[in-house]
Image: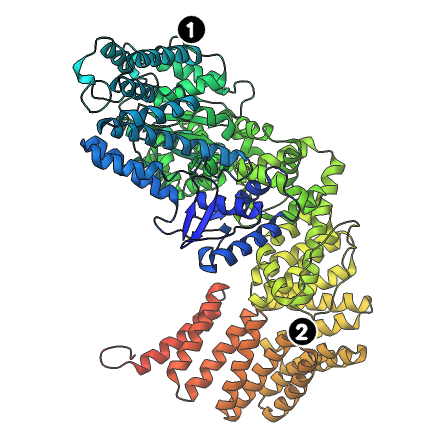
């Protein structure tokens, strides 16, 4: 298959041209071909297809175009890739790659003096061009910039080809090609020198001299500069008919004239610009990032401009990294270094491209009187000067790609490092910049930074305080440096006192104010559009640790589609991080700053409305998901949903499980925040929904924490139903954690409340839980009494699911007292009802009870079958805690049957689950494994 970009876009399979479909589909293919074998994000492809005005259905349309390309090219060409799409291209399939390879071979031959081979290779390269790159596609800024870069490579190849043809004596053919080239690109001095030589060799001396005058006039008008020395020497050689001009060979005096003014002309004094500022002392860490920058050095070439786009949040150390690395490699750039601080986020000091170009041109030796007035002319002169140089260019603190683009060299062996809070995705897509995102320091790097500033001896006086300081600063280099400065200027202050100052979120930014952390953040904030700035403030109301686009939309009170552009803007500027697809997180200090803005900028009414929208979003996302996870649980009556909100609740068990998996850490914080901010009803109801997720996983400490908050919240607003529910669920956590007295106190309080509420279902649930507690403390008769009363209440209200679960509890109690047949009878009746109602989690518990009874009756094979069914059902319902309990019993039965290997496998699985949920039952599972392995070990150790 061949992919042709050097002209209208075309794809061939063998000799057959493949029709590529609609314009949008061809644009998509072009975008993927520009970055072959690399995943291109959907957020990068959408602007390519729709510019700044994507339709609401853009994502769906994009998938349609991808399917179309897969049908045309083959499924294997566009494999599934996380976060975007990838086009698999084999070596030599793109005409662009064949062009680059042939041009490089020709250039190498020229360098070696082999004009014959050079002419052959370069002829192959230039004949690959069929017109302007991607000429049939609509004009798009990204494509236009890429085509301009590619056009520069073509012109260099054309000049190299002319060089080879002149060396071969084909002067007449050269003249026609060069006239056409110079009509479109009149500033290329090398082409002028080749034209002059070609004209001279075919006998047109007057034409050669006239060509020099044309070149001098155009250069003066366009750049204000004189012709390069090589061009002037060639003019003098022609005037004097020097013999060297007649012999076939390379142009002029044996060396090619540059594309524009040479270093000698632009800087008569031979000055070498060295503009790098002082590097940050005691630089630490960043080994991976430094290695990636070092790798860029290997990509340099005579016609290659290498660009690195270093991005990250404010204060993360982008400038420090860029300067540290630049000083380390400055010797690799013999023509010097250029540096400019673009002040992209300081409105008062922002450096416009034409001002930066003025500084660069002066550093390169151009007299101020000869510097053009327009930005375009300055850029052209700047690129001409750098075309023959090998320089390092550092563009620091850029606002966006548009500020950077005029400052990029067009050709030559330069390397450019750009730092920005913006991700510079346009620069990556169009100019092929290598993205390098800088994150906060690691713990070890943070420790090294503090040790470098304060000394390891000082840190050793209180390592715990140092750990607290690192955590409080979020490992942000700027914040760490500010704390180090405070410690250094107050040598008598103990480290734990400094750490204590950082504990309060409100005080943290105050302490760091001397280091301008607020000011640094504020510059990013002030660069935002009004919708993004409002969203940033409102996000300060979210407790974290992350949030979805739907949650952000709820906070802002707009549809999700309307909030996406603002999220993209915040992410692009590193005020938010999209740490997984569709989920966003703050750095801790930025969260504090956003919350501070929300408190100062938003009216109290707007803050309260934003919080209510937020809690409404989570409650009415969590409640339907909770009902799907635990359909047999008695429901609560949630706070009515706010009107006019489009919701996307989970519709099946798997979707509900995925929702809670993504949101449960948020909900843990949300429960407490809702209670603290005057939304107590939301607090206890969110806690109830979260319980459907944490309890089956054995996350008892989480359950304890949220239900304690829920109980306090419900008591504060005198909500008896909330108090009853929180007391009952609190008792469950206490029971599992072994706090039996506290559990019984809560159960009795719940029973009293449910009786006062005349709620028989609530009483039955509580008695069922009381039954379990009594069993655990050895009060079996009382346990049976509670279970039978719960059964009566469930049957009285027609709650067949609750009755079935209670029948299982009765069966279990009977089995533990040796009444195995009665136990099986009770559990079998429970199982039949649970299968009718599709209570899969209930079935799992009942099969476990039946398995236990059969095991005690000596029917181990039947017990194992019941246990295996139960384990699968527990897994299907994501009930890991009870899965582990049943795995332990399965192992016991297998051991009794003589299947020691099977027993160990089951116990190991149980131990892993207990370890995951931090349950001490893991120790008992490990003791079983150890006991069995000791008894089966042979003379050389444990058997196979």
Would you call the spot at circle 2 few (<14 residues within 10 Å), some (14-19), or many (20 or more)? many
Query: Could you tell whether 883 is left or right of 823 in the image?
Result: left
Q: Where is residue 456 drawn, in percent x and y?
A: 32, 36
Q: Where is residue 112 drawn, in percent x and y?
A: 18, 32
Q: Is residue 739 above or below residue 887?
A: above
- Helix, strand or loop at mark 2: helix
Q: Is residue 830 above or below residue 769?
A: below
User: Is residue 591 at all visible to an observer of this figure?
Assistant: no
Residue holding disc 2: 770
Return the disc, 2 or 1, that comes first in the chain's sequence: 1
Which image quarter: residue 391?
top left
User: In front here: 586 or 507?
Assistant: 586
Q: Residue at x 59, y 68 (%)?
A: 696
Query: Could you tell whether 901 is left or right of 677 in the image?
Result: left
Which image quarter: residue 578?
top right
Q: Is residue 643 above or below residue 159?
A: below
- Helix, strand or loop at mark 1: helix
Work out which quarter of the rendered image holds the C terminus and state it. Answer: bottom left
Marker disc for residue 369: 1
Q: Where is residue 605 drawn, in percent x and y?
A: 76, 37
Marker disc for residue 124: none
């Amino acid at each position: 298959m061949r992919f042709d970009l050097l002209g209208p876009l075309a794809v061939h399979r063998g000799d057959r041209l493949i029709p590529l479909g609609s314009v949008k589909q061809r644009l998509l293919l072009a975008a993927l071909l520009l970055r072959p074998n690399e995943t291109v994000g959907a957020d990068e492809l959408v602007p390519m297809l729709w510019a700044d005005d994507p339709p609401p259905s853009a994502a769906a349309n994009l998938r349609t175009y991808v399917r179309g390309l897969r049908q045309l090219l083959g499924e294997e060409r566009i494999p599934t890739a996380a976060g975007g799409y990838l086009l698999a291209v084999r070596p030599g399939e793109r005409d662009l790659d064949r062009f680059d390879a042939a041009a490089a071979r020709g250039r190498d031959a020229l360098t070696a003096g082999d004009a014959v081979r050079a002419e052959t290779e370069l002829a192959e390269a230039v004949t690959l061009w069929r017109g302007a790159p991607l000429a049939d596609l609509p004009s798009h800024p990204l494509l236009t910039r890429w085509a301009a870069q590619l056009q520069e490579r073509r012109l260099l190849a054309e000049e190299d080809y002319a060089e080879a043809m002149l060396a071969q004596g084909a002067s007449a053919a050269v003249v026609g090609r060069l006239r056409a080239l110079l009509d479109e690109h009149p500033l290329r001095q090398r082409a002028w020198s080749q034209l002059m030589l070609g004209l001279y060799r075919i006998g047109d001396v007057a034409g050669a001299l006239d060509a020099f005058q044309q070149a001098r006039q155009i250069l003066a008008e366009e750049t204000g500069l004189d012709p390069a020395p090589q061009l002037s020497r060639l003019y003098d050689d022609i005037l004097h008919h020097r013999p060297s001009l007649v012999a076939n060979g390379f142009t002029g005096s044996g060396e090619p004239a540059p594309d524009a003014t040479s270093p000698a002309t632009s800087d008569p004094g031979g000055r070498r610009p060295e503009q790098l500022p002082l590097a940050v002392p005691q630089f630490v860490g960043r080994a991976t990032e430094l290695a990636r920058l070092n790798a860029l050095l290997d990509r340099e070439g005579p016609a290659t401009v290498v660009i690195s786009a270093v991005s990250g949040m404010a204060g993360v150390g982008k400038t420090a990294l860029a300067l540290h690395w630049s000083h380390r490699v400055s010797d690799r750039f013999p023509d010097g270094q250029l540096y400019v601080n673009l002040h992209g986020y300081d409105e008062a000091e922002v450096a416009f491209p034409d001002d930066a170009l003025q500084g660069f041109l002066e550093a390169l030796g151009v007299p101020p009187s000869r510097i053009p007035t327009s930005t375009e002319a300055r850029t052209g002169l700047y690129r001409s000067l750098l075309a023959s140089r090998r320089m390092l260019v550092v563009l620091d603190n850029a606002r966006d790609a548009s500020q950077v683009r005029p400052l990029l060299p067009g050709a030559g062996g330069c390397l450019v490092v750009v730092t920005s809070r913006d991700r510079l995705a346009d620069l990556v897509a169009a100019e092929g910049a290598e993205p390098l995102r800088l994150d906060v320091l690691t713990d070890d790097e943070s420790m090294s930074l503090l040790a470098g500033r304060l000394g390891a001896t000082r840190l050793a006086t209180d390592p715990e305080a140092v750990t607290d300081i690192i955590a409080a600063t979020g490992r942000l280099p700027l914040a760490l440096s500010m704390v180090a400065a405070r410690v250094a200027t107050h040598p008598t202050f103990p480290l734990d006192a400094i750490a204590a100052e950082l504990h309060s979120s409100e005080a943290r930014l105050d302490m760091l104010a001397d280091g301008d952390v607020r000011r640094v953040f504020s510059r990013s904030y002030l660069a935002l559009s009004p919708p993004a700035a409002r969203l940033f403030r409102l996000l300060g109301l979210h407790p974290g640790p992350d949030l979805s686009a739907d949650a952000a939309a709820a906070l802002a009170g707009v549809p999700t589609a309307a909030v996406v552009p603002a999220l993209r803007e915040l992410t692009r500027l590193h005020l938010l991080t999209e740490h997984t697809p569709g989920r966003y997180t703050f750095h801790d200090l930025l969260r504090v700053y956003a919350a501070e803005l929300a408190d100062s900028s938003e009216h109290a009414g707007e803050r309260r409305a934003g919080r209510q929208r937020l809690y409404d979003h989570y409650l009415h996302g969590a409640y339907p998901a909770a009902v799907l996870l635990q359909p047999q649980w008695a429901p609560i009556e949630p706070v009515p949903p706010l009107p006019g909100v489009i919701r996307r609740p989970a519709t099946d068990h798997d979707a509900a499980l995925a929702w809670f998996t993504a949101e449960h850490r948020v909900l843990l914080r949300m429960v407490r925040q809702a209670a603290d901010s005057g939304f107590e009803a939301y607090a206890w109801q969110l806690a109830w929904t979260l319980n459907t997720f944490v309890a089956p996983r054995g996350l008892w400490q989480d359950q304890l924490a949220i239900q304690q908050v829920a109980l306090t919240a419900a008591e504060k607003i005198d909500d008896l139903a909330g108090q009853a529910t929180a007391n009952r669920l609190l008792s469950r956590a206490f029971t599992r954690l072994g706090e039996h007295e506290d559990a019984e106190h809560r159960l009795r309080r719940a029973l009293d409340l449910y009786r006062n509420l005349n709620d028989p279902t609530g009483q039955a649930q509580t008695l069922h839980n009381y039954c379990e507690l009594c069993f655990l403390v050895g009060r079996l008769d009382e346990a049976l009494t509670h279970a039978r009363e719960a059964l009566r209440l469930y049957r009285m209200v027609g709650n067949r699911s609750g009755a079935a679960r209670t029948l299982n509890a009765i069966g279990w109690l009977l089995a533990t007292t040796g009444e195995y047949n009665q136990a099986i009878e009770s559990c079998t009746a429970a199982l039949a009802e649970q299968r009718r109602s599709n209570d899969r989690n209930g079935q799992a518990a009942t099969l476990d009870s039946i398995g236990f009874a059969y095991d005690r009756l000596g029917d181990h094979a039947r017990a194992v079958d019941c246990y295996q069914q139960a384990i699968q059902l527990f897994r299907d319902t994501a009930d890991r805690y009870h899965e582990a309990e049943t795995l332990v019993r399965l192992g016991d039965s297998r051991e009794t049957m003589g299947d020691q290997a099977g027993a160990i496998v089951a116990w190991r699985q149980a131990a892993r689950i207990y370890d995951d949920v931090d349950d001490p039952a893991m120790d008992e599972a490990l003791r079983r494994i150890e006991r069995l392995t000791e008894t089966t070990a042979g003379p050389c150790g444990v058997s196979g």
